[in-house]
Image (cartoon, coloured by chain):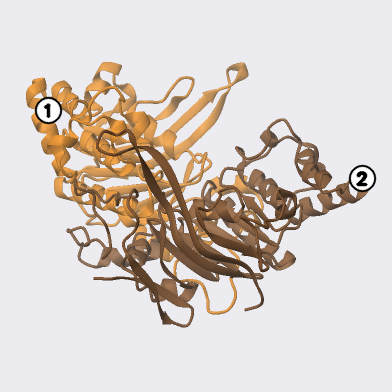
Chain colours: A orange, B brown
Amino acid sequence: MTAPLLEVKDLHVGLPAAGGQSFPILQGVSFQIMPGEAFGLVGESGSGKSVTSLATMGLLKRPLRATAGEILFQGRDLLKLSKREMRRLRGDRIAMIFQEPMTALNPLVTVGRQIAEMFYLHQGKSWAEGEKLAIEALANVRVPNPDRRARNYPHQMSGGLRQRVMIAMAMACNPDLLIADEPTTALDVTVQAEVLRLIKELCTERGTAVLFISHDLGVIASVCQRVGVMYDGALVEENWTEALFADPRHDYTKGLLGALPRLGSRSEHGRQRLVDIDSIIADRSVLTQTRFISPREKGAPA
Amino acid sequence: MSETILEVDNLHVRFPLPGGGVLGTGKRTLYAVSGVSFSLAKGECLSIVGESGCGKSTTALSIMGLQEPSEGTIRFRGKPIVGPGAPSRMARAKAAQMVFQDPYASLNPRQTVNASLLQPLKLHGITGSEASDRIAALLTSVGLTAEQGTRFPHEFSGGQRQRIGIARALILEPEIVVLDEPVSALDVSIRAQIINLLLDLQDEFGLSYVMISHDLSVVEHMSDRVLVMFFSQIVEQGGWKEIFENPQHPYTRRLIDAIPDPDAALRRAHKPTETATPPPPAGWRFGSDGSTQPNVFSPPEASELVDIGPDHKVRLLRD
């Protein structure tokens, strides 16, 4: 069996509180991602999914900090790397796509130059070479007229195109791991479908592993092979995507799936009520005490 | 279905914008809504779906009397609500009210919930204990307590704020409630609670809903009838079953295929992956650079809505 690409082991993140105490944000999150595998983290606001991704990128902002645990990437503990080492890794081996491309892109620099910067910084290319490669990178993410688009500023592009530029930047150095944090939340459904297809295709083509963060179970299902459900700073259930949807074990997962209006589930007569998670789970605090993690099957997709 | 309470006939909304002509100094026209007609029955939930910029919100604003139509009529119980002979804003307020997407942005942060709910009642001459009884009863109906009425909007969670938004829309007992993306800003579990609440209130008060949404799984769950809009026009309309189980227009199919529904996604995963992007629907107007942005500055192509079944219409392109 191959070694996992990313292994998060019992990660705790805390917010320092008065009296030297620490308010727990993540309470012992553990999961593994194999090379080339797409793993999804799903959960509602405040469940800790974004904090997990930020910790993995080494982007936790003070006062948040990892209080215990390890994040092993290719065997190295990311929590122990210096800022400089982390900066070298970020964008090169680990890349990230954010929710809102407009805030992640520099409005004063053409998108071609912003992509070229990746080649300049991480691969030692000259700016001129970088800009040529940027046009290629735009073509790879199926941007029409890439040479003309490379000279555009972010505001001249639609939301879907801007997200494609973000993907081009993220994939520029052929990272081993792509972290996608709600990459399609701000997009229209048809554009969302195109962007998801693009992420899936590129990562399969290049063998890039994906850590996909979303609140949308449908989006996760269409991209990921395995899913972890987060609730209150803990992973409450983890399983293969199909198994999770077919047979949710944890009460919270059951509630979450029942709360979702599912296509084709409406009956001929009348509209049925959706599951109210609060009513099936009287005491939410007991939730994180029981967990269902399916044992990793042998012969996982590499 | 029972009596018709709202009729929209051949609604057009056009916005004149600067920047037309060769030198960019002339005027050009944005076609936001072109020839939209539909009717709403008492107690019905009609949904308008489509992507950003398709004209669904402009249509909703016209129903609310917040956007003057360029052409066409809107009738409430047979009487026009815009143009000559239109009722006053006060009278219209009792016909239709609106629930907005972002409840925080649509509530006055400096007013308690009670004050927000009292204002419209005062304007309509309801005061004193009658008003406070009505507010307390309504707060209970939307799942809050009368005591919570003394608090300010920032003291509530997102789901509770949307309950307040709904209470504010219902306080004058309107017959029509326009729901503009009522649940798209909410988390899955809260969204389920608000959807349940909207369905309960509809039964309790016999409300008619016009729902604007891009979330087709919510639309399927709640609607009786569905209008699909694409670049200012209706391209398909029908009962929810027709639209979701027998979609005819290529754009409707494209929208339904794009829904990130877990079951559908997993079914697709078993099929061999389509590497090529699916061909664009017929009637899709491409920009000159090959982008999928149709040109909203030219009137839509001549085409007609054709009956293809009981209460099911689809737009055909004339060749």
Q: Is residue A74 visible?
A: no
Chain letter of the residue carrying label 2: B
Using the image, determine if residue B14 lies above or below residue A263. Answer: above
Give residue B28's position: percent from left, percent from top: 36, 43
Q: Which residue is mark 1?
A: A131
**Is residue A175 positioned above or below A219 on the image?**
above
- Residue A162 vertical placement versus A41 (above, below): above
Q: Nearer the viewer, mark 2 or mark 1?
A: 2
> Which is more toward the observer, B147 or B308?
B308
Q: Residue at x 48, y 42 (%)?
A: A234
Judge left or right: residue B227 versus residue A76. right
> Which residue is found at the position 76% from the left and 52% from the top?
B171
Report which residue position mark 2 lands on.
B128
The outermost residue toward the right is: B129
Around disc 2, counting alpha carbons within 10 Å, would you say few (fewer than 14), some (14 to 19), or many (20 or more)? few
Q: State whether residue B47 appears in this view.
A: yes
Residue A87: image x %, image y %?
26, 21
* Quadrant in which residue A173 is drawn: top left
**As displayed, is residue A63 above or below residue B150?**
above
The residue lying at 79 percent from left, 38 percent from top is B115
Residue B282 falls left or right of residue B276: right
User: Identity of the amino acid at label 1?
Assistant: Glu
Residue B210's disc number: none
| Amino acid type of the residue that numbered disc 2 sits on in the rendered structure | Gly
Examine the image and state in which quarter residue A71 appears.
top left
